Amino acid sequence: MTTKADAQRMEKIVSLCKRRGFIFQSSEIYGGLNGVWDYGPLGTELKRNVKDYWWRVTVRERDDVVGLDGAILMNRAVWKASGHEETFSDPMVDCRTCKARLRADQIAEKNGVKRCPNCGGKDLTEPRPFNLMFKTYVGATEDELSLTYLRPETAQAIFVQFKNVLDVSRKKLPFGIAQIGKAFRNEINPRNFTFRSREFEQMELEYFCRPEQGLELLEYWKEERLKFYENIGIRRDRLHVKKVSDEERAFYSRGTYDIEYEFPFGVQELEGVAYRTDFDLTQHIKASGKPLDYFDEETKERFVPHVVEPSAGVDRTVLALICDAYAEDEAPDDKGKMETRIVLRFHPRIAPVKVAVFPLLKNKEALVAKAREVQQLLRPHMNVFYDEGGAIGRRYRRQDEIGTPFGVTIDFETLGEKGEALRDTVTLRDRNSMKQERVKISELLQLLLTRVA
Ligand code: GAP
């Protein structure tokens, strides 16, 4: 159940995202394109931090996972074999009164009567399947032979390249292939800001194993993925794990969990962790006639590996991070009067800007020169923002609103004007506590690196 307060909170988040340059509507000057979004300067940094951290913990810090960067366009035969051409659809209903196209599962029934959520009309068509894949044509002719689709998931490139990756990486089971990339779905009703988009990014891992390891690895990856969300700062009590029931689960899956987050618009899926058995590889073996199996050197067995797939959405993770971080509290203004402060309490690891550097006054050349020096010192190691405009309190507030965890102020103490002991020290302000500590410039980089790692 979402309340009026939840709806208001979501409105504030959407407005902050536009105002501060996290997320814009695509093609806005032409009236937008429904279900498609652009990330502004801060959103780009935030999204990159999410993907980099996922890649770091999923690929670089492990011996048993390698990466792939597959193309968005693939042979249509892939989508036939995977089952997407036949069955990747949502049931759609038309409202004959207002002509709205609706997802059948989103139409509420009251007293046994289904009504259009748009106009309240009762004259609805029977549900019929609507394939979610975007069609496109490869080459100069637009006919059946040149037809293919923009990929609706990144996973299929991993399955069809399984043998090539296995041959070059010489990995032994269990091992995984990871990929981050764009996916496209012609959603009937894109909604809830970026939550259900028509173009989005996925972070997918296909973790191949022996059949008898599947169920255990499903549990393992569910736990690993929960840790991931906690490590980027999402509160554990707002994460939920749903065990997908036998009826809801894909017929080939022997177990699936949805990791969900309490968004202001309801508890919704962030990621699916599915034990997909050997379904995908077997489908491609049958359709292509190529061997995508595995030879176990020790047991001398040849078999088709099973797979556990944690599949996360980048955009949904970014939205969850923003929703989780958004807070309003009280902070003193420049005259010491308390005012409402909007703050994004991002984990420093994920924050788009790690540190802001401020000269106390912009018309004091020595302060500006020192601040620029500090900016140059930190810049190769993290995203630094330099700001000399306006009162220091206002500058802090601007950074609080975009979630910058640290602020460094260069003042007259830094220049040695209040005694030699404080020369070449700066104040380091913490966004959450608003407390300040005095730090030597020579120790600043190391201190910040440990806090944003
Ligand atoms: N390979 C499996 C797969 O694609 P999925 O549950 O359809 O599974 C995985 O998608 C994740 O991709 C979802 O949990 C979600 O985070 C993201 N996702 C799916 N459709 C999306 C959409 N329309 N907009 C934004 N993210 C989406």
Image (spheres, helix red, strand yellow):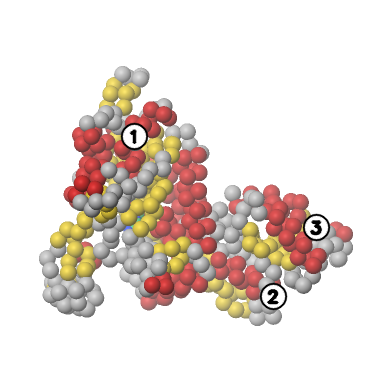
User: Residue 261 location in percent, x, y?
Assistant: 39, 59
- Mark with earlier residue (2, 3): 2
Left or right: residue 446 versus residue 424 is left
Above or below: residue 382 compared with residue 323: above
Label 2 with label 1: CB-CB less than 8 Å: no
Q: Secondary structure at mark 2?
A: loop
Location of mark 2 (residue)? 391
Q: In the image, which is nearer the foreground, mark 3 or mark 1?
A: 1
Residue drawn at (57%, 74%), measured in percent from left and top?
A: 341
- Residue nearest the observer in this picture, 223 or 59: 59
Callout 2, which amino acid? Ala
User: Residue 236 location in percent, x, y?
Assistant: 45, 55
Which quadrant of the figure has residue 374?
bottom right
Location of mark 1 (residue)? 162
Location of mark 3 (residue)? 424
Judge: label 1 CB < 8 Å from ligand 1.
no
Residue drawn at (59%, 67%), measured in percent from left and top?
A: 400
Callout 3, which amino acid? Asp
